[in-house]
Amino acid sequence: MEIPPLSGTSVHALESSAVGEQYRIFLGECGLGARPASVLYLLDANGYFGAAVDAIRSMQLSAHLPPMIVVGVGYPVGILAETIVQRTRDLTPTVDAGFGELFPAQSAMGGAPAFLRFLIDELQPWVARRYDLATGGSMLFGHSLGGLFATYALLREPEAFDRFGIASPSYWWGHGAIAGIERATAAERSDLPASVYLGIGEHETHEGRQREASRLPPTEAALAAVRHIDMVGDLQEFARTLRGRGYPGLVLHEQVLAGEFHITVGPLALSRALRTLYGAPL
């Protein structure tokens, strides 16, 4: 076992037969020894785990959130920037040939079905064997490609989690492939029983993305303009579509976070998702 990054946390290696990958699983106990009422499954844990645990513990000081376990799903490398190849493989539901041409080093993609099986069939039972969990259910949170994956999980296996925190989802992937998955779900299901938070930064428009990239080297900055991508518009259109389905068990929250860009909004969206889906209104 690794030296934990924070007090009350631990890091474990977990092999997945579904994916054929070893994952780095971060566990954080939040709630001062109380029986955990819920589990937060956090994607991109190499980048978000420490911030998530500290934020949750801070909110618990004023009882904004119940006791919970944070289960961070990461990879046996270092920081988030070193996980790009693996996360592109795991978090995307389809192949995006154009993306592969722009970023040939990230050619592994379309692994979301296998990764979802890992979460449901391998990781969730592994967590249940370690903790005496109360009946507060679970939440899946993902940002960017992680938001795309969380949406895929919502559409394909909504009963696997009670709550879905979806931040800045990359609905542009595969030129809108998630829309086809949504239509297939609507044809198969009469209900989508889940509480969902959709959050995005105000400046995640095509123009805003180019402004955000303007400090990068010119070659990298130019990539922001290769496709016309309005992530705010995409999220709003997806929310309208879900509401139009009339699913009786779906509780949907949608928020555009003022002043935020794609790379700045993740921690704020996590905080808002937790408060929205767990905390009582103040």
Image (cartoon, rainbow, N blue to C red):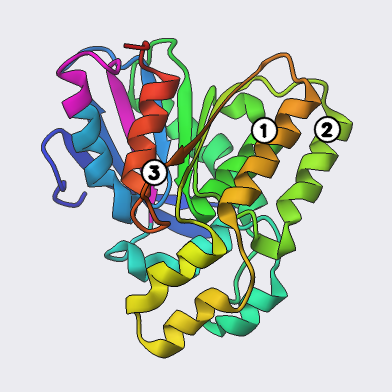
Tell me whether circle 3 and circle 1 mark residues in contact (CB < 8 Å): no
Crowding at mark 2 (Cα within 10 Å: few <14, some 14-19, many 20+): some
Instruction: Give the residue at mark 3.
Output: 258
For the C terminus, give its image quadrant. Answer: top left
Q: Is residue 64 magenta?
A: yes
Crowding at mark 3 (Cα within 10 Å: few <14, some 14-19, many 20+): few
Identify the amino acid type marked 3.
Ala
Identify the amino acid type marked 1.
Glu
Figure label count: 3
Q: Secondary structure at mark 2?
A: helix
> 17 or 41, which lies in front?
41
> Which residue is pictured at 50% across the width and 50% down the height?
146
Residue 205 in sight = yes
The Cα–Cα distance between marks 3 and 2, rounded to whole angstroms, is 32 Å
Instruction: Give the residue at mark 2.
Output: 186
Q: Is residue 16 left or right of residue 267?
A: right
Crowding at mark 1 (Cα within 10 Å: few <14, some 14-19, many 20+): some
Q: Secondary structure at mark 1?
A: loop
Q: Secondary structure at mark 3?
A: loop
In the rendered structure, find residue 157 and report the number of the disc placed on it.
1
Q: Position of residue 35 (x, y in %)?
A: 27, 12
Mark toward the viewer: 3 or 2: 3
Magenta span: 58-74
